[in-house]
Image (cartoon, grey):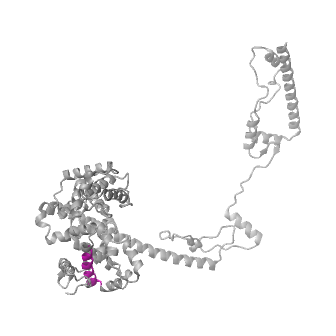
């Protein structure tokens, strides 16, 4: 009973829907017949197909057939309200020139050219805009000033009055002046770059030819040729990087007779100490060094490694040479417990690691720190350090008397700037490539060249230092300019004469030693011969 009522309900609903559709169709036909044929043809041409099935007499559905199909149980169900509103809306909006309820004229392109805008402006104001002369256009882009001020040569926007001839000429003149300055500056910089590249190519050629000489002639006959004039001149020009480590090892020597096996022994001891860092053992006390000092050294090593050549990112934690540097410094603290670790050692070890294998770097490191000057500084032997400072002041006064008196007027003593230079062998104060060249000649001439390099730096910046007071001098010498070049520095070093009244460095140093032993500590460091 209920099913029959539902079927009857759907049947009358279908009949109502079909009847309403016929009424709408008849209304549309009446409107079409009242309209003009031309408007209908335009509508047919412009109006897109919106997806509605037209109802014609031949295609109009029969109410009886639909009713039978709807009432039949096995008949397929048909959606009585097809959802075509969204499709219709999208198509209507996409059709240009038509709205949902009526026709509108097509949209025109609202963009206007600059010429049209200028014509409208002239018609509205009655004034004619004279364009600037064609010569005001920029044609030389080779030396374009990298500045927004060059925009003065550009024309104003087309919707604004154009420049007058006088204004355009004035802007052209200003622009030409800017271009001339830019061109002059560019030529100067290009010449400077060309000169630098030329010097670099020449230096590379010299290094390549010198490398052949060092490998084929000098190194096979080291003991015979190391002191010859030819070798010393090649040495002064800088060692080729490919043979630098080998020459350093030969020049420093191995007076301590350290072997790679001995390095492994002290490295294993260092690793054991790292494992038992917080433990106190009787073995440590018997070696004559307190546990607190040892632990302080280990902590200082960790802290100093992170600050060693930070711009290279190779010695910091996670870098390729972090563990190698840590191993060499740890092994040295076990090898020389009387010295331990002192700040500055990490820079020396790092430079050696960059040029030598691990075991060879440790051997060179231990022998280098065993030299009298380095041992005096790293053991903080105050009496020996004062002797070196006094000897340095003798040659300071001899070569740079004006700057020497300027330093004396401020009571600026050599220890303020020399300690950092000597502790790190200039590897912290100078660019790395320049520091390596200083090391080259240091391996040739010994400790004398370290102090000669210090005098060369003072000579290079003498004019600047003479204008400074105590604080600024100390700050300047603590952090030297980064643009220092090897050519300028070594030309100043070459101008320093390490000779005082026919006395050389070793003789002056011996005289200072003798005076201090005799108790004449109140004499001026500048000895009179």
- Report the residue at 32% width, 84% height from top: 404
Q: Which residue lies furthest to the left in this view?
A: 224
- Left or right, 176 with respect to 39, comes to left
The image position of residue 275, as x and y in percent, is: 32, 48
- Residue 281 placement (x, y as % from top left): 28, 51
- Secondary structure of the magenta portion, mostly? helix
Question: Residue 524: which quarter of the image?
Answer: bottom left
Instruction: Look at the image and give the residue range highlighted in magenta.
Output: 385-400
Q: Residue at x 40, y 71 (%)?
A: 190
Q: Position of residue 359 (x, y in %)?
A: 23, 54
**Residue 396 lies in the magenta stretch:** yes
Quarter in which the N terminus is drawn: top right
- Figure quadrant of the C terminus: bottom left
Name the residue: 23% across, 52% down: 266
Q: How many labels does the image show?
A: 0
* Viewer can see residue 211: no
- Can residue 401 be seen at all in this image of the molecule? yes
Q: Nearer the viewer, residue 384 or 66?
A: 384
Answer whether residue 24 is magenta in the image. no
Query: Horizontal placement of 257 versus 193: left or right?
Result: left
Residue sitting nearer the eye, 39 or 22:
22
Q: Is residue 449 above or below residue 362?
A: below
**x then y, percent, for residue 231:** 16, 69
In-image side of 337 versus 107 (left or right) = left
Q: Quadrant of residue 376?
A: bottom left
In this view, the residue in front, 216 or 410, is 410
316 shown above or below 62? below
521 above or below 285? below
């Amino acid at each position: 009973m209920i099913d029959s009522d539902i079927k009857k309900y759907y049947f009358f609903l279908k009949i109502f829907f079909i009847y309403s559709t016929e009424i709408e169709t008849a209304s549309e036909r009446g409107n079409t017949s009242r309209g003009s044929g031309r408007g209908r043809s335009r509508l047919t041409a412009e109006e897109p197909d919106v997806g509605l099935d037209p109802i014609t007499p031949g295609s109009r559905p029969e109410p009886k057939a639909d009713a039978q199909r709807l009432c039949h149980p096995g008949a397929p169900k048909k959606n009585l309200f097809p959802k075509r509103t969204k499709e219709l809306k999208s198509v209507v909006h996409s059709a240009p020139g038509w709205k949902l309820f009526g026709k509108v004229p097509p949209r025109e392109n609202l963009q206007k050219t600059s010429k049209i805008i200028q014509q409208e402006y002239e018609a509205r104001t009655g004034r004619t805009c004279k364009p600037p002369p064609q010569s005001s256009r920029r044609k030389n882009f080779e030396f374009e000033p990298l500045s927004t001020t060059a925009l003065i040569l550009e024309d104003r926007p087309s919707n604004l009055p154009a420049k007058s001839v006088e204004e355009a000429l004035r802007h052209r003149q200003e622009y030409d002046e800017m271009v001339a300055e830019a061109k002059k500056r560019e030529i100067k910089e290009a010449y400077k770059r060309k000169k630098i590249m030329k010097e670099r190519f020449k230096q590379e050629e010299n290094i390549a030819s010198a490398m052949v000489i060092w490998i084929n002639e000098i190194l096979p006959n080291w003991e015979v040729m190391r002191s010859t004039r030819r070798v010393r001149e090649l040495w002064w020009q800088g060692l080729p990087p490919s043979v630098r480590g080998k020459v350093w090892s030969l020049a420093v020597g191995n007076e301590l007779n350290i072997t790679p096996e001995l390095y492994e022994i002290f490295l294993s001891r260092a690793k054991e100490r790292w494992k038992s860092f917080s433990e106190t053992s009787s073995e440590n006390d018997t070696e004559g060094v307190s546990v607190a000092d040892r632990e302080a050294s280990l902590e200082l090593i960790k802290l100093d490694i992170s600050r060693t050549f930070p711009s290279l990112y190779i010695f910091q934690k996670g870098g390729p040479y972090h563990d190698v540097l840590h191993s060499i410094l740890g092994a040295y603290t076990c090898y020389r417990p009387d010295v331990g670790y002192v700040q500055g050692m990490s820079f020396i070890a790092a430079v050696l690691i960059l040029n030598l294998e691990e075991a060879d770097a440790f051997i060179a490191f231990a022998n280098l720190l065993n030299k009298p000057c380095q041992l005096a500084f790293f053991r903080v032997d105050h009496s020996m350090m004062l002797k070196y400072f006094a000897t340095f002041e003798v040659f300071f006064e001899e070569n740079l008397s004006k700057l020497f008196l300027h330093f004396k007027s401020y009571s600026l003593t050599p220890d303020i700037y020399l300690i950092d230079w000597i502790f790190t062998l200039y590897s912290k104060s100078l660019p790395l490539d320049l520091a390596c060249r200083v090391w080259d000649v240091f391996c040739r001439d010994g400790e004398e060249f370290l102090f000669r390099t210090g005098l060369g730096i003072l000579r290079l910046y003498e004019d600047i230092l003479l204008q400074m007071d105590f604080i600024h001098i100390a700050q300047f010498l603590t952090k030297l300019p980064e643009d220092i070049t090897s050519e300028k520095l070594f030309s100043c070093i070459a101008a320093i004469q390490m000779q005082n009244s026919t006395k050389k460095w070793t003789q002056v140093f011996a005289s200072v030693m003798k005076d201090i032993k005799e108790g004449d500590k109140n004499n001026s460091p500048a000895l009179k011969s």
